[in-house]
Image: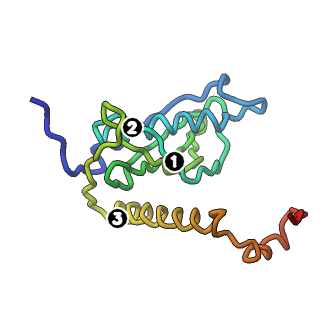
Amino acid sequence: MTEMKKKFKHIKESQLTITELMLPSNSNFSGKIHGGHILNLMDQIAFACASKHSGNYCVTASVNKVDFLNPIEVGELVTMKASINYTGRTSMVVGLRVESENIRTGKSKHCNSSYFTMVAKSEDGKSTPIPGLILTSKDEIRRFSRSIKRQEEGRNRTSRFSSKVFKIEEYLHLFETSNSKIDLKEK
């Protein structure tokens, strides 16, 4: 008999933390760790967190706002923390925080925060329902709310700049102080 899946889970049930030593093989010529290597690690922990929550294989649907705040040096320990911030019907937002630590000094720095939208897939590759979240703190409610707002803003941004509705004259003022030159060829 297969175990019946929970309808709701606490966030702590799927939270994950990984720590990895940054090696020279993952660095650029100035001794900083490649952003692509960090993104790969972030995708892995987002996958693991989402899969743990959903009980299914998950795929990355989108990544929202990746800002590299501080460089990561060769020889530092990088710690990534992942937590489910939001659940939809088949998708979830995994919040990630990346910190690095200088082993000799013990000094830590915040390097990145990001949000990965992951979708649960059934064995036949179709999107499949996931458990909801049991929110137990003001911070958990804030993160869930922020994810809802991010989705709304994303939908608005996408529709506003659709080629079918975009009105160039509404945006020309933005170019007055930009480092660009408009040279439209009238057709």
Element type where label 1 sits in the image: strand
**Mark seen at residue 141:** 3
Q: Nearer the viewer, residue 135 or 22?
A: 135
Helix, strand or loop for disc 3:
helix
Residue that appears at 59% across and 50% down: 66
Residue 123 in the image, given as x and y percentages of width and height: 31, 31
Q: Residue 173: which quarter of the image?
A: bottom right
Q: Residue at x 57, y 66 (%)?
A: 159
Q: Which residue, given by chain and number where applicable, does mark 2 sit on?
A: 58
Q: For marks 3 and 2, give the one nearer the viewer.
A: 2
Q: Residues within 10 Å of mark 3 (few under 14, many from 20)?
A: some
Residue at x 78%, y 72% (from the top left corner): 174
Q: Regarding mark 2 in the picture, which secondary structure is present there? A: strand
Position above or below: 140 against 78: below
Q: Is residue 126 left or right of residue 166?
A: left
Residue at (47%, 61%) from the top-left corner?
Answer: 151
Mark 1 crowdedness (10 Å alpha carbons): few <14, some 14-19, many ≥20: few
**Which residue type does callout 1 highlight?**
Ser
Please report contact status of discs 3 and 2: CB closer than 8 Å, yes or no: no
Q: In the picture, which quadrant includes the C terminus?
A: bottom right
The disc label shown at residue 62, or none: 1
Label annotation for residue 126: none
Frontmost of labels 3 and 1 is 1
Mark positioned earlier in the residue sequence (3 or 2): 2
Residue type, mark 3 in image? Ile
Q: Is residue 118 visible?
A: yes
